[in-house]
Image (tube, rainbow, N blue to C red):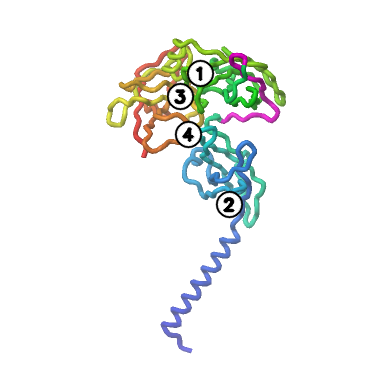
Amino acid sequence: MRSTPGDAVRTVRVLALCVAVLLAAGCSARQGTVEGMASIDGAPTAGAEVQAFVKAGAERTGTPFLATTARDDGSFSLSLPPGNYFLVARKTDRRDGRERTYKGEFPGNPVAVREGGATRGIVLPLEEMSSGGFTPRAGTGVTGAVFADGKPVRDAYVYAYPDNVGIVRGPAYAAFARTGEGGSFRLPLREGVFRIVARDKGGENETGAMSGAGKSGGDAGIRVDLSAGTTADVGRISLHSPEEAKRRRRVAAGGMEESAEEIRGTVTRDDGSPAPGVRVMAYADPRMIGRPFAVSGPTDAGGAFFLRLPKPGKYFLGARSEVGGPVSPGEWIGAYDGAPDHGVAVRLGERRAEIRIRVVEKW
């Protein structure tokens, strides 16, 4: 039989349809699934964004290969081609009167996805970014109670500073807890040496300097040496009002005591004008994520700042007009660009000066 142009067109269409069906079936067969749960403090976390990356390291801060949102019970499911993937979860939540950003990575990264297979039981524990990556160990910690004028204090903050930090003020604490009824507290930690202090700050934010009515207790810190699985009772911590002159100096320096190491400089906007009201933050992590190691007081009208450091070392400097939480539109942000990694090395007893940081308005 003689073929016609119409027959040829129909043949091409049929072949194209067959190819499409085969490709769809092949792609479906090649997929594997990853199932698990996102959690904060062991509780299922609804609404967490679960992301799958094909590369480790800095690539995990870029665009993920695939992302999904955890269901109401914290569970999630991803359908992925065969390969190895790095799983990360993120969530911004409002707790204790403020927005907090949580992040977590699957401890068993990378996850191997097999063709047509299913990987189940993945648990993605999220931690608050301000925790600096500190992970308590089960059954390890400190208990006690906070009092002022002979009466128990509810909602006071109790901080644990690593003993090697050298200071018990500022944001370099490892973990914190708040007191409950009767002024009692339990602060989960891990093995190590810590110094415990308590503060009734008069606010809902655990960072920053105390208000004028604030009180503190523990002085240079109650030293505890913890082994894994043990809990130490530090007893009663009594709060007292600080000396006003010292308090004002701490406020100007971002809540830090006098120290031998110091950084001074100026923060300017992108047009070169001074940037008042901006805080400079020193991070131990070059990615400048999590809680900073030290924070300056707000810059003055001329954009000048000074930042006290609890010990010498290399610090990575960033600047923000707000403290804590994700960056918001209208906020001024920036980083020290005098070095490719934004880092400044400070030797023992050194006082660095003339550090310049430029900030831009985030939109």
N-term-proximal mark, 1 vs 2: 2
Q: Distance from label 4 to label 2 (Cα)?
A: 28 Å
Q: Which residue is mark 3?
A: 282
Mark 2 vs 3: CB contact within 8 A: no
How far apart marks 3 and 1 lie (CA) works out to 25 Å
Q: How many angstroms separate mark 4 from mark 3 (CA)?
A: 16 Å
Of residue 357 and residue 361, the one placed in the foreground of this image is 361
| Dot label at residue 325 | 4
Q: Which residue is mark 2?
A: 78
The percent coordinates of residue 219 (x first, y second) are 57, 12
Left of 212 or right of it: where is 151? Answer: right
Q: Which residues are magenta?
A: 133-150
Find out whether the residues at labels 1 and 2 contact each other: C-beta distance under 8 Å: no
Q: Residue at x 57, y 15 (%)?
A: 239
Answer few, some or many: residues within 10 Å of disc 4's Cα (few below 14, many 20 plus, some between 14 and 19): some
How many numbered badges does the structure rendering display? 4
Q: Earlier in the sequence, mark 2 or mark 3?
A: 2
